[in-house]
Amino acid sequence: MSTVATDIQKAVEDAAAHLYVWALKDIPQDLRDAIRDARERETSVPGQRVLDTIIRNVAIADDRTTLVCQDTGIAVYYCRVGEHFPLHPARIYEALYDGTERATVEHPLRSNTVHTLTRENTGQNVGYRVPIVHWDFVPDWDGLDVKCVPKGSGSENMSFLKMCVPADGVAGIKRFVLDSIVNAGGKPCPPGIVGVGIGGSADYAMHLAKEAIARPVGTRNPDPEVAKLEEELYGLLNETGIGPMGLGGDVTVLQCHIEHADTHMTLNPVAVNYQCWAARRASAHIAADGTVDFDREA
Ligand code: SF4
C-alpha cells in the first residue's frame, strides 16, 4: 500500500511482518504441551503414530527454522487499540497489509489469496479485504496489541453456523457442536481446538467462534456457566472416537473454547470454527513510542 509511513506505522508493519512468519514457524508452548499431553493420553496405535509424527514435524520445523505446515493460511489479525495510541486504525490496517505482503515476499511464503470468483491470485497473501483484521478499542490506554492467527483452509472449511431457537436451549447448542465435529471427521487435521461462538447475531456468533480458537489452549471463559459448558463439550467431543487425523482414538480435540455474547430473546445462534493441530498464533505489544515486545504465548 502506498503511504508515507510514520515511524510508528513502520514499527507496526515490521511487527506484522515478523509475527506472520514467526507464527508459522514457532507454535506456542501451551500448544506444544497440549500435543504432548494428547500423546500421553492416546491409546490407539494409529492415533499414537499421528501424534508422534506431529511432534516430529514440530521438532524438524524448530531445527530447520521452517514452517510447521505448508499452508500459510489466510492472514488474520486481532488488534486491541488503546484510545491514545498515536496511529489511526486506518493506518494500522495499512501497516498490517504491508507487513503481510513483505513477509510473503521476503521469506518467501506461499501466496494463498485469490479473487473469490475468478480464483486469480491477488498477490502476496493480501487482496481486497485481506488480511482480515478484527478490532477492539480500549479506553484510557496508549498501546496496541496485535495477534496474528494464520488460518489454514483445511480447518476453516470446517466452520458451521446454526440459528437454534431458544427452545433448543443448551442441549441444542451441545448437539450442534457435536454433530459439526462428527461430520467434520478427519478433514480439519485433528486434534485441534474447537471454537464455539454463542449468542449475539449470526455474523457475531461466527466472529466469537473464531476469537475462541485464538486463545491459549485450555484457558477457560471467565463466566463460570460458559466455562462449565467448555469442560463438558471438551469431554463429549473426545468421546466421539474420531481421533488424531480421523483415524480413531481417544484424542479428537485438544480443547473446546467458547466465547459468548448476550442475544435477542428469540435468538440462539451457535457457530463452530475449527482450528487444526497447527494452531498458530503470535502476538506483539506496540507501545506509543514504537517499542515492540513480542509474546508467543498471548
Ligand atoms: S488444516 Fe492446519 S494442519 Fe491441516 S493443512 Fe491446513 S494449516 Fe496445515
Image (spheres, rainbow, N blue to C red):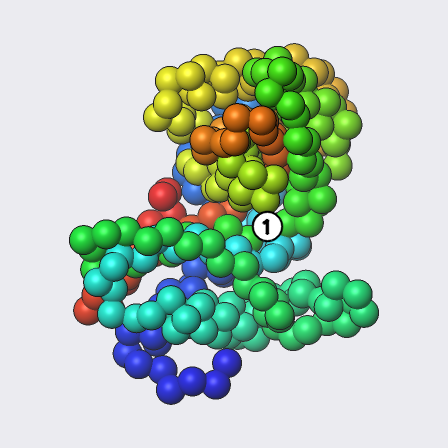
Residue that protrudes farthest toward the right in the picture: 118
Q: Is residue 48 above or below residue 24?
A: above
Quarter assignment of residue 83: bottom left
Q: Amino acid at mark 1?
A: Lys
Q: Is residue 15 above or below residue 218?
A: below
> Do we see residue 33 in this rendering?
no
Badge count: 1
Quarter assignment of residue 274: top right
Q: Residues within 10 Å of mark 1 (few under 14, many from 20)?
A: many
Quarter assignment of residue 206: top right
Which residue lies at the image location 50% right of the left edge and 70% below the top edge? 97
Q: Is residue 139 left or right of residue 114?
A: left
| x, y percent for residue 257 | 50, 29
Q: Is residue 123 left or right of residue 198?
A: right
For disc 1, the marked residue is: 151
Between 107 and 169, the one lying in front of the other is 169
Which residue lies at the image location 68% right of the left edge and 49% below the top edge? 153
> Do we see residue 205 in this rendering?
yes
Q: Is residue 155 above or below residue 93?
A: above
| x, y percent for residue 298 | 36, 43
Q: Is residue 164 left or right of residue 225?
A: right
Q: Is residue 242 above or below residue 122?
A: above
| x, y percent for residue 240 | 70, 16
Question: Does the closest atom of ligand 1 sit within 8 Å of the Cβ of label 1?
Answer: yes
Which residue lies at the image location 32% right of the left edge and 57% below the top edge? 81
Which residue lies at the image location 31% right of the left edge and 81% below the top edge? 6
| x, y percent for residue 106 | 53, 74
Q: Secondary structure at mark 1?
A: loop
Between 60 and 264, the one lying in front of the other is 264
